[in-house]
Amino acid sequence: MIPPVASKFVAGETPGEALDHVAVLNRRNVSGILNLLGEHYHDPASAISDTNAYLELIDEIAATDVDACVSVKPSQIGLGVGDDEFEANLTKIADHGAERGVFVWVDMEDHTTTDVTLDVFESLARRHDGGERSDGGMGLCVQANLKRTREDLERLADVPGKVRLVKGAYDEPTEIAYKQKDQVDKAYREHLEFMFEQFEDGIAIGSHDPAMIAHVRELHRTHGTPYEVQMLMGVRTDAQYELASDDVTVYQYIPYGNRWMSYFYRRLRERKENVLFALRAIVS
Ligand code: FAD
């Protein structure tokens, strides 16, 4: 069982607990993106096991009336085993999501995975577009800290599906990535401007940054392109509710599963306020 201190950031160990959390959010007009915790598998059995867990999760979402989709990590569903394993497992999840009307996001991991993730996403997104499997929809995450991202966005402008822009969570080499916060923020703003001009299928802003959210709202007023704001469970929850009550489409990214420990420590390490929160929860 997840200790109460970790339950700020992780919805529970089971899909049922995660869906209960989504139901509460839905009442405040916030939708859910469910992520089964797990990454960096190098054995096929773990990748297949998590792939099957996503298929069951999609069935559970489709069987309820909660407003939720899923987000998968490539290294969780086979990329650490081989490109073909990743493609086969993502195809299963994408097909299953499309058949049951459940949207499937693909997270982006470190730069060594970018090319194959884009290639597999593009071929699946094109195959699903306009066919009888097009109900669910697909989306891909891209990272503003990578210098290549403008080119990737130019490619994705012509691919069906949504794109989630994040700043980037991985410590990348200087040759290929912006390392200073102001450089990443500048790239983020420029990418948003490009997306609002060129994208038709929907833009997702995966950020807690009030400055980026204000920029997006301004761009929306100018261009009218649909967009959604995505934030993590346990981070700026009041802002999520406030945006939702102001008619912004808001999704909360909700991790769950029994591999919660390392995710919880990552959240604690990234911000001193989170450590203080944990300490207060432990002593109270
Ligand atoms: P930062 O640049 O970290 O902070 C800017 C400002 O935002 C802060 O000054 C503060 O005002 C506010 N803020 C930020 N964090 C907090 C907080 N904890 N509490 C209160 N205020 C805060 N990265 C990937 O590499 N691949 C992915 O697939 C991926 N998916 C993501 C999906 C979602 C839904 C989200 C929200 C993030 C995802 N990320 C992913 C992580 C992302 O790349 C960033 O590392 C992370 O979001 C931090 O950047 P930021 O834009 O939120 O704000």
Image: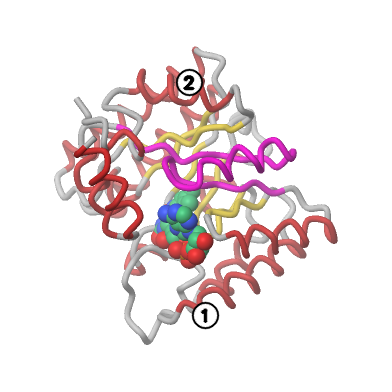
Q: Is residue 89 left or right of residue 28?
A: left
Residue 71, above or below 13 = below
Q: Which-is-in-front pick, marks 1 and 2? A: 1
Residue type for callout 2:
Ile
Q: Is residue 54 left or right of residue 97?
A: left
- Residue with the mark numbered 2: 61
Residue at 65% from the left image edge and 34% from the top image edge: 131
In-front residue for pair 216/43: 216
Whether label 1 touches label 2, CB < 8 Å: no
Few, some or many C-alpha atoms within 10 Å of disc 1 (few <14, some 14-19, many ≥20)? few
Find residue 268 and name its label.
none
Few, some or many C-alpha atoms within 10 Å of disc 2 (few <14, some 14-19, many ≥20)? many
Asked if the magenta segment contains residue 233, the reply would be yes
- Residue with the mark numbered 1: 182
Quadrant into which the N terminus falls? top left
Start-end of magenta stretch = 227-256
Q: Is residue 120 visible?
A: no
In-front residue for pair 86/46: 46
In-front residue for pair 22/91: 22
Q: Is residue 177 left or right of residue 26?
A: left
Mark before the other along the chain sequence, 1 or 2: 2
Q: How far apart are the alpha carbons under marks 1 and 2? A: 39 Å
